[in-house]
């Protein structure tokens, strides 16, 4: 049985118009993948950038999978949220990144997007905060589902991941 160990961190985010950012993350894998250790989902703390537009989280990720097949390779679903001065939380961006298949240390930048909404919703977002959000963000993060939405770029989430594969050569993957 092949194994995949992913150790790293959600470093932070940049390029978002909002401040007070935090990230909810979730690792999804196919049916052949079994989680042996670690947490499949989590949430970072809120960071208020003091200088510039970079929010730092340094939130750890440590998961260990076993698999009998390569279909459904693990992907990180990211939801960046912002908290305003009144304590309200609203989504600032959604992102999806596939865990690298190559062994080693990887710096990954995940571009995020958010639903654009109509002119009235965009004006309300600027004046009141909030804005359109996805009811079920998990399935809508893929390219096939996203192409039906009107979206706009939001910002970038920065990750550092160490990928440690074991016995993947049996399945034709050179790591």
Image (cartoon, rainbow, N blue to C red):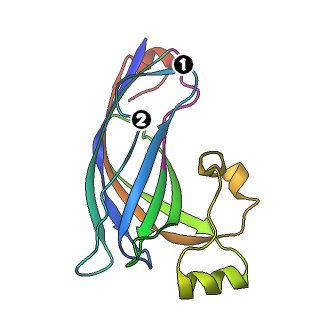
Residue 87 in picture, x, y percent from top left: 40, 71
Residue at horizontal 59 percent and vertical 46 percent from the top: 138
What label sits on residue 107 in the rendered view?
none
Q: Residues within 10 Å of mark 1 (few under 14, many from 20)?
A: some
- Position of 96 relative to 39 (above/below): below
Res. 69 mark = 1
Q: Mark 2 packing: few (<14 Cα in 10 Å), some, or many (20+)?
A: some
Q: Where in the figure is residue 77, as x and y percent of width and height? A: 50, 47
Q: Estimate the x, y position of residue 63 in percent, counting from the top left.
A: 34, 31
Query: Would residue 81 be counted in the magenta stretch?
Result: no
Q: Is residue 85 above or below residue 4?
A: below
Can you identify the residue that label 2 sits on? 40
Q: Which segment did they paint magenta?
A: 68-77
| Label 1: which secondary element | loop
In the depicted structure, whether residue 75 falls above or below residue 48: above
Q: Nearer the viewer, residue 97 or 89?
A: 89
Q: CA distance from mark 1 to mark 2?
A: 19 Å
For the point 42% across and 16% down, which residue is it? 2
Quadrant where the N terminus is found in the figure: top left
Residue sitting at the far top = 1
Regarding residue 67, the answer to whether it shows in the image is: yes
- Tell me the SS state at disc 2: loop
Circles 1 and 2: CB distance less than 8 Å?
A: no
Q: Main secondary structure of the magenta part?
A: loop
Is residue 72 highlighted in magenta? Answer: yes
In the foreground, 53 or 173: 53
- Image quadrant in which the C terminus is located: top left
């Amino acid at each position: 049985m092949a194994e995949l160990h992913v150790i790293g961190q959600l470093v932070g985010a940049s390029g978002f118009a909002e401040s007070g950012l935090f990230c909810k993350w979730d690792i999804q894998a196919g049916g052949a993948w079994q989680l042996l250790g670690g947490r499949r989902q989590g949430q970072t703390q809120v960071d208020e950038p003091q200088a510039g537009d970079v929010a730092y989280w340094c939130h750890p990720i440590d998961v260990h999978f076993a698999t009998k097949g390569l279909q459904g390779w693990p992907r990180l679903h990211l939801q960046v949220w912002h908290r305003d001065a009144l304590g309200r939380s609203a989504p600032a961006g959604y992102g999806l990144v596939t865990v690298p298949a190559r062994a080693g240390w990887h710096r990954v930048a995940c571009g995020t997007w958010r639903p654009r909404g109509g002119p009235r919703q965009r004006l309300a977002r600027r004046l009141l905060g909030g804005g359109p959000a996805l009811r079920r963000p998990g399935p809508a993060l893929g390219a096939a589902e996203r192409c039906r939405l009107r979206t706009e770029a939001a910002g970038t989430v920065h990750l550092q991941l160490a990928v440690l594969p074991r016995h993947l050569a049996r399945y034709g993957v050179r790591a």
